[in-house]
Image (cartoon, rainbow, N blue to C red):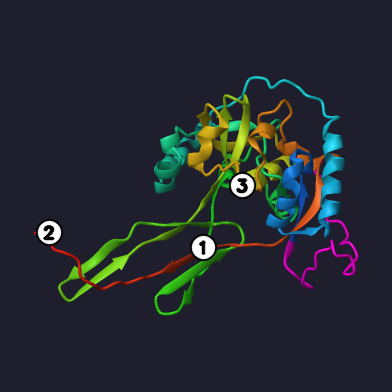
Amino acid sequence: MTETINPPMRPPSAAADPDIQEHPVGAPERWGRALLGWVQEPDLRPLFQASAVTSPMSVDDFISEARVRRQARAGLTVNAPGSVTVAELPAPLAARADSLRATEQFRTHYEPFSAQLAVIPLADLVTPQWWVDAEYVDSLAESAPVEEDLDGMFDFSFSMGRLARPMNIGLNGAAFASARGDIGGPSPLRVSRYSPEKVTFEFDVTPRPNWVWVVVSADMNRLFILNGVHHLLALMKAGRQHAYCLVRPANSLGDLTANGWNPQNPELFKPQELTGPRPPLLRDYLDQQQAADVGIHLRQCFLRLALQAEVGLIPRVA
């Protein structure tokens, strides 16, 4: 049985109250589920501003909601983590696993960290982020494959982003935009064609792989999600028990900075919350006592590219 996360009614406007934020009528926003009980009190006001929260509209209401959730969190049962269970992918997927390992994305971003393809249980996954997009999770859950559909599970867990057409900016600039963070980085510049009359340079911009990526951290003795929270939560909502992923070992959360883990990021929980006796778990987003309905202003990531040519003089060395 799955749960549908329905967005609450928007609160009435209260423009006369100076603590109420004004948002443009029809401003793009998304509704989600927030684990405010794990956000530390000093971080609440900065989080409200940095995340462009649209509901609750008042920062004081946001803080009050967090205090209610923190009190509810105190009643959670604390169970010592058991042994971390990681299994190999089903044998019929061996060829697909080899193809994924042969990609440039895997060799560049995952192989250096001893990443392995695996099957993991969903029950006790630790989540790194305070907010999830509930509408996106619901749409993913509708297409979640059954666990017997091996190819479907593989495609769901190792999806690739898609790039929108870039926009030209001026004579020598371009920009990409994405609401889902699908943009990867540009490749190094290379010479594609050369003649004494003309040199042609080129580079590639590729989408970011949206692969489920977890870590077994020794200081947690739990599986910690590095990427794929929405896909994993969608599988859980759809009643699945396991997921496919890439998994890597780590001695501590501090080892994850090379993977983009930044403990100063206001959208992520602090390390002491994640390594505590009862960290925020994936299933807590579905618990009405633990998760609050919070709307945030819709944002998108972008990549701006510009050619800057400089002609001048430098000393010759030979």
Nearest to viewer (mark 1 / mark 2): 2
Q: Nearer the viewer, residue 235 or 51?
A: 51
Find numbered disc 3 in the image and state the secondary structure of the residue it sits on. loop
Quarter of the image with the N terminus is: top right
Q: Nearer the viewer, residue 22 or 76?
A: 22
Rendering coords of residue 33 (x, y %): 77, 48
Nearest to viewer (mark 3 / mark 2): 2
User: What is the C-alpha distance between the residues marked 3 and 1?
Assistant: 26 Å
Hey, what amino acid is under mark 3? Asn
Which residue corresponds to the image point at 82% horizontal and 48% vertical from the top-left? 63
User: What is the C-alpha distance between the residues marked 3 and 2?
Assistant: 46 Å
Pointer 3: what residue? 265
Find numbered disc 2 in the image and state the secondary structure of the residue it sits on. loop
Find out whether residue 176 is within the magenta segment. no
Which residue corresponds to the image point at 86% horizontal and 36% vertical from the top-left? 71
Q: Which mark is residue 317?
A: 2
Nearest to viewer (mark 3 / mark 1): 3
Which residue corresponds to the image point at 75% horizontal and 37% vertical from the top-left? 283
Find out whether residue 23 is within the magenta segment. yes
The boundaries of the magenta stretch are 1-29
Hey, what amino acid is under mark 1? Leu
Pointer 1: what residue? 163
Rendering coords of residue 259 (x, y %): 50, 41
Hey, what amino acid is under mark 2? Val
- Asked if residue 70 shows in the view, the reply is yes
Q: Dominant secondary structure of the magenta stretch? A: loop
Q: Residues within 10 Å of mark 3 (few under 14, many from 20)?
A: few
Quarter of the image with the C terminus is: bottom left
Say which label, 3 or 2, has the lower sequence index: 3
